[in-house]
Amino acid sequence: MTTHADHHRRPTVDVPPPPPATSLRWAEGALEVIDQRELPHRLSWLRLRTVDEVIAAIRSLAVRGAPAIGLAGAFGVVLSARRHTRADGRTDEAAVRADADRLAAARPTAVNLARAVSRMLPHLSHGPDAVLLAALAAVEEDVAVNRRCARRAADLVEEMLPIGGLRILTHCNTGRLATAAVGTALGAVLELAGRGRIAEVLVDETRPLFQGSRLTAWELEEAGVPYRLLPDSAAASALAGGLADCVLVGADRIAANGDTANKIGTYGLALAAARHDVPFLVVAPESSWDHTLPDGSGIEVEERGADEVTSPGGRRVAPAGARVFNPAFDVTPHRFVTALVSEERLVRPGAPAPAPHEREAVTRPARELASHTRALYARGWLPGTSGNLSVRLPGSGDEILITGSGVDKGTLSAADTVVVDTLTGRAVRPTPGAPRPSAETAIHTAVHRGVPGVGAVVHAHPPYATAASLTAVHGGERGVGRLPIRDLELLKGLGLTDPRGTELPVFANREPVELIAREVAEHLARTPDAPPALLIAGHGVTVWGRDAEQARNRLECVESLCHLLLLTGGTPGGAPLGAPSLP
């Protein structure tokens, strides 16, 4: 029998880069696994030839991650079957089943281990080669399952957050190191990165064994995906500060009601995400579901040795004799999980209880508004804290949701939005510490009140429209200037009754902003067929549409039209810039 000490002294086989796509493989009669204890300093493989070596590798976390330890357990049954098969081809099934029991008990929380081991046992009667074929098939199945999980989760994230670069927060390691290949939650992150949607990944260290900073960071570095490490204790602050749009985690066991066991620290992360209206998604294969458990109270949580806390990396940091509570996992109640994603289905098990100010009623519009805002910031049209977006809340009558005052538009989150009454321009049900509406809210409310069917308004500072506003003619009707535009194909993008030409109104930049808003309201009342855009001299452009996407598209049209005017020195087929307003 190989002892635990023998296991640690066993020589490893270094593999030159590039690293393989899988974390474990069968080669020449042995199971080979990436030794995850060595990462990120060295990529090396362990050759496991006996059941005891497989158990030791699982317990020491040389191989870890629910799907990966399940597969390792399956190959442990293969090794046992080969050892207990005589020359005449007869297998001592009782001995193999005894080994299988030891394998299944190596780590109790992840249901995948016991399930994968039990799946091998029906093949014993056909000999060790049949068991091997079943284990190899399980690897191929895991790869396919992970791909489906990752794609379904990525699709869901894009459905919830359709615009802009995404900031994803992760916990522990759920990539190819935790599976046969691809990964679950981290697989979804890499799928989103392949679609060009990832701006940054925030990686929890995942103490005490640092699976995040050692393993997830290594996988992201390998894939060329931008990331930042943060202590587990900083995750709540990151969510409060709007640094993450979504949390993606894996699972070791999921009860029938959706309660989820995952690496310790997940529960606290779910609580913080719920408090700050950030989607919390669990990505795990169907094999992680345990429908024999009605809820998470029946999940056995493994408690690991005290030395992992008192002596991380082999160096003592705590007083001798310090007592330790070191659970490897915690259980997140289903009500704090936005969605569970497997290869077959999407389950929305619950949601946080409504806050007193009923903010959850605007959670989805707020996320979409924040996403559009960050996308315009990335274009350079909402520099710093300038500009704002608003959307009408469905079924709310006269209430809109608008980005808060003084918030950096590049990091703006759903928590940085505020509900405003369009009749008064004031915040609805204000709470201490909540965002304040900016002064330009008055312009937004004037448009929402004055134009039927408006669902969204954008006030931005794109450079060409802002520059063109300074060249437009002023002194027209009631002091409103005009920027004439004729015979440009892009005019069709504004949804005009006559797309051959229009005149964008240009308002003087007045203080306070309420004076501008009053003139805007008067202008809209006088000209019901006005184009869905207006300029404020030296102060940017305001556009609107039936929803945020249409408003953003119209903003792009106005900016491109103004760019063409400045390039040509005038309006093709019309008056030059600075000429008298068209009659």
Image: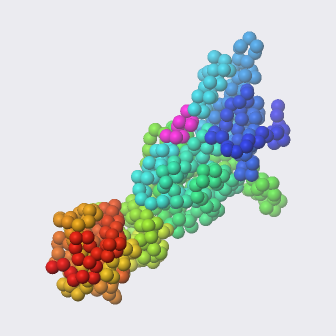
Residue 351 picture quarter: bottom left
Residue 523 is left or right of residue 168, and the answer is left
Most frequent secondary structure within the magenta stretch? helix
Q: Quadrant where the N terminus lies?
A: top right
Q: Residue 128: where, in percent of width, then height?
A: 68, 21
Q: Is residue 145 magenta?
A: yes
Residue closest to the eye, 132 or 258: 132
Residue 266 is left or right of residue 274, and the answer is right
Q: Which residue is drawn at the image coordinates 32% and 66% (left, top)?
A: 557
Q: Is residue 533 magenta?
A: no
| Residue furthest out toward the top | 88
Q: Residue 71: where, in percent of width, then height?
A: 64, 34
Q: Quadrant where the C terminus lies?
A: bottom left
Magenta-highlighted residues = 141-148
Residue 226 picture quarter: bottom right
Q: Which residue is drawn at the image coordinates 60% and 33% (left, top)?
A: 139
Label total for image: 0
Q: Which residue is drawn at the image coordinates 37% and 62% (left, top)?
A: 365
